[in-house]
Image (cartoon, rainbow, N blue to C red):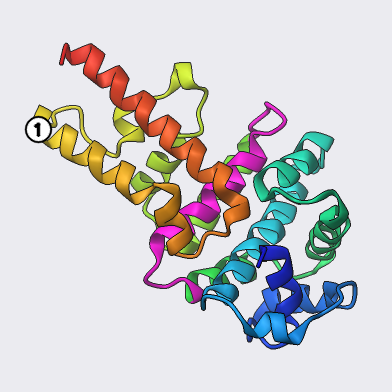
Amino acid sequence: MSVWGKLAGAAAGLAVGGPIGALVGGVAGHYVIDRDEAAEGDGKGEDQVAFTVGVIALGAKMAKADGVVTMDEVNAFKEVFKVPDGEMKNVARVFNLAKQDVSGYEAYAEQLATMFKGNRKLLEDVLDGLFHIAKADDAFDPTEEQFLSQVAKRFGFTDTEFNYIKARHVVASKRNPYDVLEIDPSISNDDLKAQYRKLITENHPDKQIARGLPEEFISIATEKVAAINEAYQMIVKERGL
């Protein structure tokens, strides 16, 4: 079942709750809910709904933070989510409800941090999705970076970990390849290769889907792996390996 079907199913029985659950409830009336279909699945439905609505909601709060919502940002939602044309109106409803909600971004970030406790890689995937949206208009605003930094703190990431995540989203020509690979330049060649293999394994699309990333977000995994490969090749060339 697609994540959009699971979003409909959330109102039919997934106990999402909290501010994310309130947003699901706000759009549930616009879906034809099939309770039998919602009851089926692989057990990841709740995580996938929370992930999807959480990214949309935090994206809305981020758009509000810089004061401007551009068509590029709206199109970025469609690109990241692989949203069918017929579902864009429902994404827009979630986005607008979150933007109008008096609750701060903190409530959404803290709910995701609680739901995905012990699944930090999925929280990292959330940040990757938000970075993708933030840079969609080719103008990564300082207020957006500050917003993402604060979300990362709510998720339990250190400043160093946040900088490693951010490094993957910097313009390729300005990336620090060591930061992308989450390593120090003094690392040995053997440890470099081991770290590269570890990151490629962790971020393989199949691994990401297994930990709860909806299939519709596969572009996040593809972009991340591409950045890791490019960084590794830069270091290999630099070291003459």
Q: From this viewpoint, is residue 146 visible?
A: no
Residue 207 percent coordinates (x, y): 39, 55
Q: Which span of residues is magenta-colored? A: 115-141
In the displayed structure image, the side of residue 214 where residue 133 appears, left or right: right
The picture places residue 63, in percent across and down from the top left corner, at 75, 47
Q: Where residue 241 sits: x, y (%)? A: 15, 16
Name the amino acid type tagged 1. Asp
Identified at 12% across, 36% down, the residue is: 191
Q: Residue at x 72, y 40 (%)?
A: 76
Q: Is residue 235 left or right of residue 132?
A: left
Q: Nearer the viewer, residue 237 or 205?
A: 205
* Residue in front for this viewpoint, 235 or 217: 217
Report the front residue among 158 and 199: 199
In the drawing, does residue 153 fall left or right of residue 21?
left
Which corner quadrant of the image does residue 35 belong to? bottom right
Residue drawn where x is 13% and y is 28% of the image: 186
Residue closest to the eye, 110 or 143: 110
Is residue 185 shown to the viewer in this render? Answer: yes
Give the position of the N terminus as an image quadrant: bottom right
Q: Is residue 172 above or below residue 4?
A: above
- Look at the image and say whether residue 223 sits in the magenta stretch: no
Residue 36 image position (x, y, % from top left): 71, 86
Q: Which residue is mark 1?
A: 190
- Which image quadrant for residue 190? top left
The residue positioned 32% from the left and 42% from the top of the image is 200
- Element at label 1: helix
